[in-house]
Amino acid sequence: MIPKEHYRWVWDTPNTEEYFEVVKKIALAQRMAFNTDFILSKIIGDEVEHAHIWVYPNKEVSGDKMDFEGNLKLIKENL
Amino acid sequence: MIPKEHYRWVWDTPNTEEYFEVVKKIALAQRMAFNTDFILSKIIGDEVEHAHIWVYPNKEVSGDKMDFEGNLKLIKENL
């Protein structure tokens, strides 16, 4: 998840609370979408020079992680 | 960082916004304490069965990561 405006690091965003709120919303939707309680989130930051937060289910979930459209649909349905 | 009350997962906490606010506060203090912009944060969750969020500087920073008391003091001074 990335902000539309450019900030180098997550910690530089002025509205980090809202950013994290959306992270939680997506995490809760992923729980429903992938039928698991175990959702991971990582803030690292040197992969791309733009603030970004990883949110993804654990690797035990069934399904195809390369099916971006199908997974997006599942997540959207559970928002 | 762990909440005092027990919740199995970070996503189960009722006041996740406040939890994340404290994460940001600690991350900003670590930036000052360890003189780096690059602070990582991870929500994984299967290491301990209690909600917890990792917050720590990148490995290029100088200092001794085993010096818990000294590092705590540095972080507190920069809160």
Image: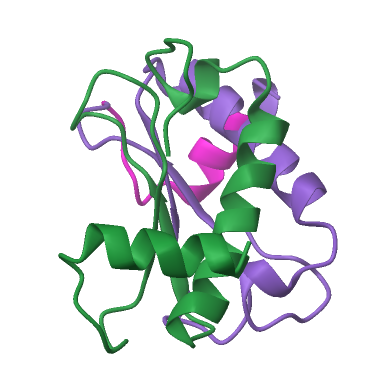
Chain colours: A purple, B green
- Locate the C terminus of chain B and report the quarter of the image it occupies: bottom right
- Report the residue at 77% width, 47% height from top: A17
Up the image or down, A16 lies above or below A75; here it is below
Q: Residue furthest top?
A: B6
Q: Which one is in front, B28 or B51?
A: B28
The percent position of residue A53, horizontal first and vertical second, equals: 55, 58
> Left of B8 or right of it: where is A33?
right
Write down the quadrant of residue A6 in the picture.
bottom right
> Left of A55 or right of it: where is B44?
left
- Locate the N terminus of chain B and report the quarter of the image it occupies: top left
The percent position of residue B59, horizontal first and vertical second, equals: 26, 80
- Report the residue at 73% width, 80% height from top: A7
Up the image or down, A45 lies above or below A59; here it is below
- Report the residue at 32% width, 87% height from top: B61
The percent position of residue A34, horizontal first and vertical second, equals: 42, 23
- The residue segment tinted magenta is A62-75
Judge whether residue B25 is colored magenta.
Answer: no
Q: Which one is in front, A25 or B65?
A: B65
Judge whether residue A68 is colored magenta.
Answer: yes
Write down the quadrant of residue A77 in the picture.
top right
Q: Can residue A2 be seen in this view?
A: yes
Write down the quadrant of residue A11 in the picture.
bottom right
- Report the residue at 57% width, 49% height from top: B23
Q: Is residue A44 visible?
A: no
> Left of B65 or right of it: where is A15?
right
Up the image or down, B77 lies above or below B60; here it is above
